[in-house]
Amino acid sequence: MAQDPTQRPGWERATLEKLAFAALGEQKATRRWKTFVRLAWLAFFIFLAWFALSRSTPSTAKTTAHTAVVEIKGEIAAGGDASAEFVVAAMKTAFEDEGAKGVVLLINSPGGSPVQAGIINDEIKRLKAKHKKPVYAVVEETCASAAYYIAAGADKIFVDKASIVGSIGVLMDGFGFTGVMDKVGVERRLLTAGENKGFLDPFSPMSDAQRAHAQTMLNQIHAQFINVVKTGRGDRLKLDTPGLFSGLFWSGEQAVEYGLADQLGNVDFVAREVIKAEEVIDYTRRDNVAEKLAKKFGAAMGEASVRSLQVATPALR
């Protein structure tokens, strides 16, 4: 019969040693696996960051003849994809590229900040004069308010027959809750230094003087908008069109009729038939992955404090 292992001298020590070595081996294997997984994730994020950075801006080495496209999509606002910072940077790159025979602003926006639109419009005029290259606006679904403010700086505006174009006006919106507060017995306790510091506070009544002040400011910005449109469109604009500067908007077909746009056409048509450079290169500046993550983190951390400091501002939309 085989001898019982437990009857051998020192069997307890031998068994413990085996268990200890087995545990150490398992710990080493676990550490190796964790290290491998972490390195794999690190390599993935490095690749992702490199890929995003390599695609965030177009190459400036393109020297063959082409049409440069800069997208203006969504709300025109600081910090967004259609901000003056991004659009102007993309336009500069496009204009400076020797291969770009013309620049197309591909627009699909309901409007936004008059300040951002004004900066972009000014840069369009400056870059056109400096580089002697044509600029064309091509409208997809919508080119309204601040978006049209930008388009008015282009040499020509091309639209689809069903595009929405116009809305030449300014608004400042908000809400007032004073009547509801009186009915439910809620008292607003707002302390200010300066009699108009609480101007546009939704929980405080608006005086006639404050309303007149806001209207004067809106009228001034509206006049600036109208002047930009008249300067950009010139004799093409049918000034006798009813409601032309009232904030109304029209279809692309009507916009051509009233001189708000020049003709029907899309990006490929403009590249092929107008600029005569059929190849289209996108110069649009976009957030890379790292920038998007940073913005989301910052927005999550600071959203509450920013909202508490926000006041109503004029908008072209």
Image: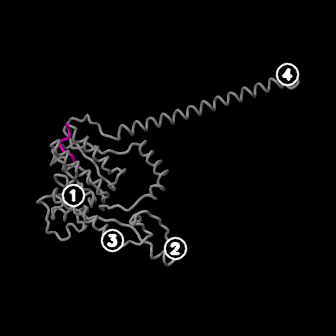
Mark 4 neighbour class, 10 Å CA radius: few under 14, some 14 to 19, many 20 or more: few
Badge 1: residue crowd in 10 Å (few <14, some 14–19, many ≥20):
many
Closest to the camera, between mark 4 and mark 3, is 3
Q: Give, as a single range, the part of the protein colored magenta.
A: 98-104
Q: Secondary structure at mark 1?
A: strand
Q: Is residue 101 magenta?
A: yes
Q: Quadrant of residue 140?
A: bottom left
Real-space Cα distance between discs 4 and 1? 93 Å
Residue 2 location, x and y as percent? 86, 23
Of the numbered discs 4 and 1, the one sitting upstream in the chain is 4
From the viewer's perspective, is the residue at label 3 or at label 1 nearer? 3
How far is mark 1 from mark 2, CA to CA? 52 Å
Q: Residues within 10 Å of mark 3 (few under 14, many from 20)?
A: few
Q: Earlier in the sequence, mark 1 or mark 2?
A: 1
Residue that mark 2 sits on: 186
Q: Earlier in the sequence, mark 2 or mark 4?
A: 4
Residue under pointer 1: 159
Say the numbered circle drawn on residue 10.
4
Examine the rendered structure and indicate whether residue 207 appears above or below residue 124: below
Amino acid at dot 1: Val
The disc, 3 or 2, on the residue closer to the chain's N-terminal end is 2
Q: Amino acid at mark 4?
A: Gly
